[in-house]
Image (cartoon, helix red, strand yellow):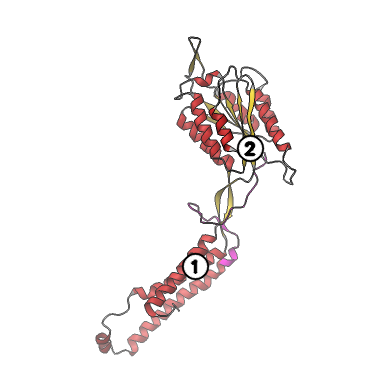
Amino acid sequence: MPAFTRVTCREGFTRGVAIDGFAQPWWLVLLVPVAALVAGYLLAQRRRYRAALRFSNLALLERVATRLPGWQRHVPAALLMVALLLLTIGLAGPTAQTKVPRNKATVLLVIDVSLSMQATDVAPSRLRAAQDAASKFVRGMPPTINLGLESFAGTPAILVPPTTDRDAVVSQIQSLKLAESTATGEALAAALNSIDAFNAQIPGSEGGPPPARIVLMSDGKQTVGQDEFAMATKAGQHHVPVSTISFGTPYGSIDLDGRQIPVPVDDPSLEQVAQLSGGQFYPAQSNAELHQVYDTLGEQIGYQTVHADVSKPWYVLGTLVCLLAAGLAIGRSQRLPV
């Protein structure tokens, strides 16, 4: 399965990540002269102190200057050393893992609208909870992702071909209607055809068509149509992984013509579909769990972890500390900390 296209992270402040390497580590050699400057400063202060004791009239000094300069006089020099340290690290090109939006991908969201989705084992109903979570998932996708929508019961329907128009997809999600039967295999076949048709409209590029993924949410086993496992295998052969969401509990039931019909969720089938296609399986038995699954999928599909250059914060902080050191030195002694 090919990886999603790599993108370049813009420079900026990186929050909550740790440096994991340097692009140009040889610049760290400059830490040696920085350490030498620190040692030289400490040695100079020690010599100055000894000279003052050797040649000063202590009795006279006590009357003329009752208070010796405190530790504050060392602050500008210390800040200057810190600034040099920060700037040296910046020159070494620190890198860190950070998440950035993918620059292109095709995602088809496939939602089961069979009658079992009216079960209320998940409040207010499986379908209503699915609509809310799916809408949030769609709106959270980066604008560079082409996302389409398909519903299926006894037959599949491509409601929105892959597009960057999130409002169109959300509007169709909120308008989903229930129908009889569950044709999971037919739904996967229609999803693959939709992705192929969309890719055929994209001008050829060196890297080929954008990577694609199907997100299938269902609550029951297939009842009609093509073999879902054969179609899952075909999806894997076409490098289109299917992420399946099994939504509902083993205790769900619906009222059909006055009879209570059990509609337990079918985890094994959906898990096998994911495995055969190279995707991942996510069970969800509550509204909160479903939202968490969609959040996880949103992070996986819409973003990728890359090694990014995070030197800019070090340059900025080093420059600010240097300016602070100069300001304190001039304000205190009318000269720079040298």
Of marks 2 and 1, the one in the foreground? 2
Question: Looking at the image, which residue is at 42% across and 73% down?
Answer: 327
Residue at (58%, 63%) from the top-left corner? 25
User: Residue 55 at what x, y percent from top left?
Assistant: 34, 90
Relative to 63, is 7 on the left or the right?
Answer: right
Q: Which residues are magenta?
A: 1-27
Residue 278 visible in the current orientation: no
Q: Earlier in the sequence, mark 2 or mark 1?
A: 2
Q: What amino acid is at disc 1?
A: Thr
- Classified by dominant secondary structure, the portion drawn in magenta counts as loop
Residue 290 horizontal/vertical position (percent): 49, 31
The quarter in which the N terminus is drawn is top right
Q: Kindly identify which residue carries mark 1.
A: 319
Q: Residue at x 75, y 43 (%)?
A: 204
- Provide the secondary structure element on which disc 1 rests: helix
Q: Position of residue 229 (x, y in %)?
A: 65, 24
Label for residue 297?
Answer: none
Q: Is residue 329 visible?
A: yes
Q: Which mark is residue 163?
A: 2
